[in-house]
Amino acid sequence: MRSDDTLSSMPSDLPWSAIHTVLLDMDGTLLDLHFDNTFFRETVPHALAQHRQITLTEAQRVLQEQYRSVEGTLDWYDLDYWSRELALDIPVLKESVAHLIRLHPHTLDFLQAVQRMGKPMHLVTNAHAHSLALKWRHTAIAPYFVSITSSHALGRPKEDPDFWPLLENHLGFDPSTTLLVDDSEAVLLAARQFGLAFLRHIAAPSSTQPPNPSRQFDSVLDLGALLPGGGHR
């Protein structure tokens, strides 16, 4: 683990010559998690309070209970599930705050640099199809990826150790020469258990919250620190 001061300036020492495949998370890694945090902590509670004619505090309490009940499962990421459970049109609500969708600093620099090296990049995300479609429209980064895999297609969230052999079979990568970058320690733990050789943690998934470096994985503020040739300073 590195201190916040060190994180802000030190590039990660990735052995790029040994990396043949790059797996990238989306929310919090490529994209600012501020959008998702705002949506689930503010937009949905206000909509639920209005729909049920209850106070905002009561709506927040109800949602926290429901969030906790499915955390770490595919249902947590399934917009259709939340639309049914809450009787709200969750995809339409997401559109209402889509102006908050933005790339992290240096995301494009990283994607372009890895593309120039000729190393295939695969997006591996827990995001639901509705979220993917919305975010691609607002970021236009899909063409950088050889493939885009949602955990919903494989039937397991990335936090589940069973997800990773399914992904290996789906993509055909070699774990010993593969890099995964993710902002979730639970996901990185599952990937390490599976045998992925190169793991990096994003310590600042949201621009509105302080960095939270991992105690178990090499952390960087954003993808700029992983740029080939010394990183962004």
Image: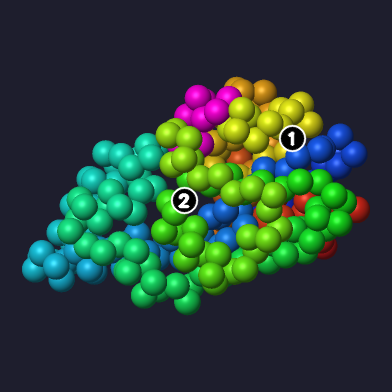
Q: Nearer the viewer, residue 82 or 207?
A: 82
Q: Is there CB contact under 8 Å for labels 2 and 1?
A: no
Kindly identify the amino acid type of the residue bearing the numbered disc 1: Thr
* Residue 195 lies within the magenta run: no
**Residue at the spot 71% in from the left edge and 32% down from the top edge:** 173
Q: CA distance from mark 2 to mark 1?
A: 21 Å
Q: Secondary structure at mark 1?
A: strand
Residue 81, image x and y in percent? 28, 48
**Residue at the spot 67% in from the left edge and 43% down from the top edge:** 23
Pointer 1 local density, CA inside 10 Å: few below 14, some 14–19, many at least 20: some
* Mark 2, residue position: 127
Q: Secondary structure at mark 2?
A: loop
**Residue at the spot 81% in from the left edge and 55% down from the top edge:** 115
Q: Nearer the viewer, residue 22 or 228?
A: 22
* Mark 1, residue position: 178
For residue 131, what is the image quadrant?
bottom left
For residue 13, what is the image quadrant?
top right
